[in-house]
Amino acid sequence: MMAKIKHPLHSISASGTIGGAISFRATARGAVAANTPQPYAQKSSAQLANQQRMSEARAAFKTLSTADRGHWQTLASKYRRSAWACFFAEYQYQFTQTPNMPLIPEANL
């Protein structure tokens, strides 16, 4: 298998993999070489439930009104995050709380 590396290996910004065994990536503290993580099947009931919850959250985000989307965008710029990240954080928070918690878009970030 050929190496797929961007930038020279001895540079600060080396990134890519060699033979699917070693990965190079740039971090805030410099370049890092590590074993490439091996994928595994995500089939446990908890993993499948989380995948379903993420799919439902994405569908809910796509159906937001223009005003609600603007609310999340305003909140996101305050925290320097994406509107989706703010929405999903609140969605996850509300999903794991009791049913009497406030409904979206009342953000508790």
Image (cartoon, rainbow, N blue to C red):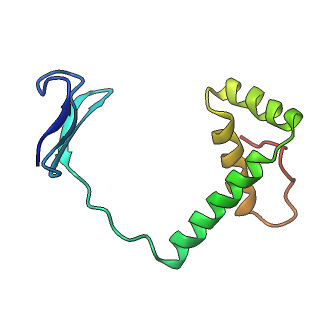
Give the quarter of the figure containing the C terminus. top right
Q: Where's residue 36, x and y in %?
A: 22, 51
- Establish if 75 lies above or below 12: below
**Residue in front for this viewpoint, 56 or 85:** 56
Estimate the x, y position of residue 52 in percent, counting from the top left. Answer: 62, 66
Q: Quadrant of residue 87?
A: top right
Q: Nearer the viewer, residue 68 or 103?
A: 68
Residue 39, relative to residue 65: is it above or below?
A: below
**Which residue corresponds to the image point at 11% horizontal and 49% vertical from the top-left?**
1
Q: How many marks?
A: 0
Q: Residue at x 28, y 27 (%)?
A: 29
The image shows residue 7 at horizontal and vertical percentages of: 19, 23
Q: Quadrant of residue 65?
A: top right
Left or right? Give the position of 22 relative to 82: left
The residue drawn where x is 84% and y is 58% is 101
Image location of residue 31, percent across then percent down? 21, 30
Q: Is residue 61 left or right of residue 2?
A: right
